[in-house]
Image (cartoon, coloured by chain):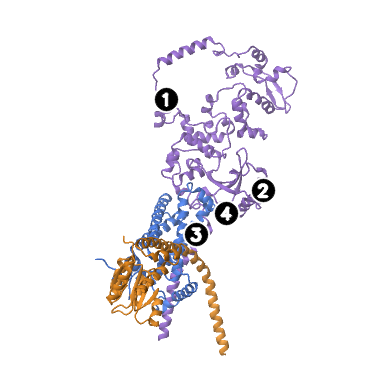
Amino acid sequence: MNTKLQVLVIDDDAVVGRSFDRVLSEKGYEVSTVQSGEEALDSIENTKFDVVFTDIKMPGMDGLEVTERIKARCPWTPVVVITGFGSEDNEARASVLGASGFVHKPLTPEIIENITLKALNEKVVAEEPVEEVGMANKADADTAQQAGVLRKAGIFAKNAGLFFAAPFIALAYIIALPFVGFYMFAKLGYQAYNKRHLSA
Amino acid sequence: MQTTYADHFRHGDNYINPLPVRIWHWVNALGFVLLILTGFQLRYMDLFRLLSFEETVKLHNWTGFVVIANYFIWLSFYLFTDKIKVYHPELDAKKFFSDSFRQIRFYSYGIFKGESSPHRVSPYDKFNPMQMVAYQVMMLVVVPIQFTTGIMMWDVKRFGNWIELMGGIRVVDTVHVLIFILFVFFILVHAYMGALGQKPSTHFKEMFTGYEEKD
Amino acid sequence: MTLQSRAGGITGRPKPVSAALLVSLVILGVILLVSPAIARSSSEPGTKSDSKCLKCHSRKRNKTLKDGDVLSLQVSKTEYANSVHGDIGCTSCHQAIAARKHPSRESIASKRQLSLTLNQSCRKCHAKNFKVYESSIHASLVAEGNLMAPLCTDCHSAHAIESMAVYQPVTGLPCKKCHENIYEAYAQSVHGGARANGNVIRDSHIQAPICADCHQAHGVTAVAASNYLQSTCLDCHPDASLAHRQWLPNAGLHLDVVSCAACHAPLAERRINLELYDNTAQLPVGQHNDHAQIKKQLHAIDETGAGLDPLELWNLVRANSEDGQETDITLRGRMEVSTGPEAHRLAIKAEAVRNCDSCHHKGSDAFQNVVVSITRPDGRQISYEADKEVLSSIMSVASVRDFYAPGGTRIQLLDVLLVLSLVGGLAIPLGHITVGKILKKRTKQGDQ
């Protein structure tokens, strides 16, 4: 089993993938590069990635769609959108679709490394933020492996915690539902009454 | 030939129910029907006698154990895959209530007008908000209680201390019967609502093939 | 009967006599001849003074007692001489006579009074059995002043005392004297029949039980006391527990809660006995509390006098729980047969109730009679009628929480809920379909 952190880069411009590979491979990451959204979806079927970078403007499936589908398949995988023009509109849409960050071209090795760490830290922020940052900063293969195990345990704990908490939250909702329903009906009625009253 | 996730997208299908879930569901369905029928027989020996009490007890017990084992297929599948998200709570109460009322409005009005459900099914968001709370409570509270009380009554002496802790055998039985009554209601409504897809067969096909058919 | 002839064959088979046995028989014969005391075979009582007593007492003499009753003073010389006490001398038991002037003018209150006084002299030699007797239900009845309750001589007779083993098996005496209906039931049972035929249990020398085998001779206890009787059954039927486990679900529970006779006396009328039990002290209420007071309380709670209804029963449990503050009072349910004689009409195995349905359905005869009982310190139970509804009322969840038989004692309110759930489960789909159809029709009309 590969214990290195897995990074996927999706960009129709192969040079982007290569620069990510050059920078991150040195730091103990395993970088896969693909040139289209379709290929990306095939890759995530076979490999579990820890972070995904995607270009927005691509022939065929565009980066926003790729983001949406990857989030649907692996909701816990952070997806960082690489954008050439940094348009507000695209960023907002990507945010809604679940993108965890943005990075603007042109890219430097420092930007690539920092944005990767940031994306990974955000992913585990709920569990052990301080420790994770420390380990990720060393960024050698050993700590990456440890981080990987910790992260998986953390995700499992979080998932299971939410899972077993769910019925109790659900019970609260079920009990509250008729009251909230009644309140909303009353509110609607009051508004309708006011409207009629005011118009009259 | 191995079909990939991307393939399903390309075909426009939505893979909702993975194989373990489907196996669990149908074993569970069959088990529940048997448990309910034998439950009726055990309780109403004076009204009808399709089987003797002794045979019915045996059938009820064995079915119970199969259903309990089957439950762990379900539990491990969700615990150890990221599909667990399907059973995660909606932490945004406002969203929950507004989505719920939209869902209620749909079932009590929109559906008759030919609207489609306000909830879009996807592999990580399978249930509408009302289904979600119902299944969360069912699978993690009601069903385990039913298993526990059932096992207690299977060997009353062995679990005597636990029974005493619950307040006596009659309390244990009454809880078991109350949940049985709830299940009778549930299975009728569940089967009917299963037929409220785009076509009556939609959701049933979903549970057999795993895919949501897209129109 | 094949069983009879087979068993007879076993007992009647001549056994080879060993040389050692022959030798010991010869030695025994010599001893018997040499020792006149042991070899006593005549009808003469052993001691000299005895013949003095019998000089008068072998004749027909009567004494009128204070209560007007006439006491015969005659003792049969032969009977006494042949009894096991033939050689111990009259004064061994009639000690008072030796000390005082005899015959005395002192009057005797009644026959019973005389027996009560003389009863104490048995203790001198039979201390162990006497002690056991004192713990028995018979002694406790005597202490209560019950004139029918047996003293030593009522079972063993006064002067013609014999070993019990000699006569009881055949005639049922002395138990039959007071418990005739029970003896009749026993005589018709599988045990009574086997005993009369002289059958033995399998290849052993053990015969089918007589009264004392199950009830103990001197320490005869109240039937309701503990699980004593059941363990007696299991003493001779050690495989029974395992045999039940092979087919009976919750076999251990059944053996605890259902008396053997409830199934093995198939014709008997059954009932449910709810014993007021203190879970904290692990004792029946009444064994440490004042049972008379609880009895009074029972009468007070049962306002209508028609037996305890579910609410009254719940009040009873609650009232007793409040008394002891921290005590946890419950009702321990047991299925048993209604009457003593029926409990003795045990049938052969093939006739025993094997069909679960016989109890596990509503309306089963087993749940038609319900009594609430308080166990007294001597093990006897005071039973009080209760309405059979106490087993199927919703209040049973609180009051009869430790007794439940699936199918047989189901709670009626839950039936109502089940019907509602069925109706609701069908009405929701049907209603939804109907609303849909109506709306469709309307929109069509609207379109037109």
Callout 3 and callout 2 share a chain: no
Point 57% across, 55% down: residue: C395
Q: CA distance from mark 1 to mark 4?
A: 57 Å
Point 53% across, 71% down: residue: A178
Q: The residue marked by circle 4 belongs to what chain? A: C
Under circle 4, the secondary element is helix
Identify the residue position indicated by label 1 in the image: C11
Q: CA distance from mark 4 to mark 3?
A: 16 Å
Residue type at numbered disc 1? Thr
Measured from the top left, where is residue B91 in percent x and y? 47, 70
Residue C142, quarter of picture? top right
Q: Nearer the viewer, mark 3 or mark 1?
A: 3
Of mark 1 and mark 4, the one earlier in the sequence is 1
Residue A106 visible within the image: yes
Q: Which mark is residue C441?
A: none
Identify the residue position indicated by label 3 in the image: B178
Identify the residue position indicated by label 4 in the image: C398
Q: Colour of chain C?
A: purple
Is B194 in front, or is A112? A112
In the depicted structure, whether residue C156 falls above or below residue C400: above
Q: Is label 3 in contact with label 1 (beta carbons under 8 Å)? A: no
Residue at the farthest bottom position: A200
Is A57 in front, or is C263? A57
Point 71% across, 22% down: residue: C63
Q: CA distance from mark 3 to mark 1?
A: 61 Å
Identify the residue position indicated by label 2 in the image: C297
Q: Colour of chain B?
A: blue
Under circle 1, the secondary element is helix
Task: State the quadrant of the C terminus of chain C.
Answer: bottom left
